[in-house]
Amino acid sequence: NTAALFAFRYGTVTIGFSEYKVWWVLAVGIAAAMVSAPLWGMLVDRLGSFRSMQIVLAAWFFVLLGTVAIPWLGLPNDLYWAIGAFSGIMVAGTWVTDRPLLLKIIPAEHAGQFFGLHSLTGRLGTIIGPVMWGFIAADKLWFGQGPSIGLGMGQTYSVVGLIFATILALYFVSRSGDEFGAGL
């Protein structure tokens, strides 16, 4: 959610695209998500939710790595088009895979409660993610005003923070999959 929220700002400020061009990159990502969602569903049915989620998280790692590689390695900015498309595919993979995964690890009689908690944690992440992005990227969290409590490292380092979060998620999904007999 954080990556999607800041994709526009990252595209304009860090990549250097116009707002118009970033809107089109996001549209390509949405189209890629719509086309790939049924394919993710077939993959989950074939490989299972744990293995599918491991694939999704590993792919997110490479998408985010590509995102930081553009400015750090001086790669062509037009690679952001591919990042947008692959991000859409990964968003679809995340959405299609996480619900069957949740059903696999919870007691069936408490599914309603756990789906409520799933929704709540998603909303909480929508708050915490941008705060962490701002803390890493900016030195002043309140739109350039207020005390200097952020790290001021820039947006690219915020993406690096997402990479570390992805690695952590992959670790926990892999451990859970091993516990449930579904690891790689």
Image (cartoon, grey):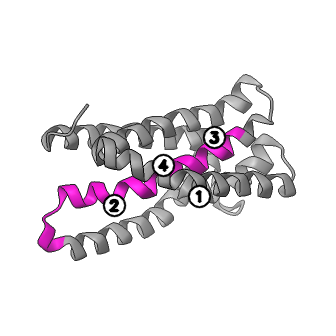
What is the secondary structure assignment of the residue under circle 1? helix
Disc 4 designates what residue?
39
Disc 2 designates what residue?
99
- At a point 67% along the width and 46% down the height, the residue shown is 84
Q: CA distance from mark 4 to mark 1?
A: 10 Å
User: Most prominent secondary structure in the magenta stretch?
Assistant: helix
- Locate residue 37, reporting x and y percent: 51, 55
Q: Is residue 51 left or right of residue 6?
A: left
- The numbered mark, 4 or 2, whose residue comes first in the sequence reads 4
* Image depth: mark 1 or mark 3 in front: 1
Q: Is residue 183 left or right of residue 129?
A: left
Residue 108 against residue 167 in the figure, above or below: below
- The numbered mark, 2 or 1, whose residue comes first in the sequence reads 1
What is the secondary structure assignment of the residue under circle 3? loop
Disc 1 designates what residue?
34
- The numbered mark, 3 or 2, whose residue comes first in the sequence reads 2
- The numbered mark, 1 or 3, whose residue comes first in the sequence reads 1
Label annotation for residue 158: none
Q: Which residue type does callout 3 highlight?
A: Met
Q: CA distance from mark 3 to mark 2?
A: 35 Å
Stretch in magenta: 82-110
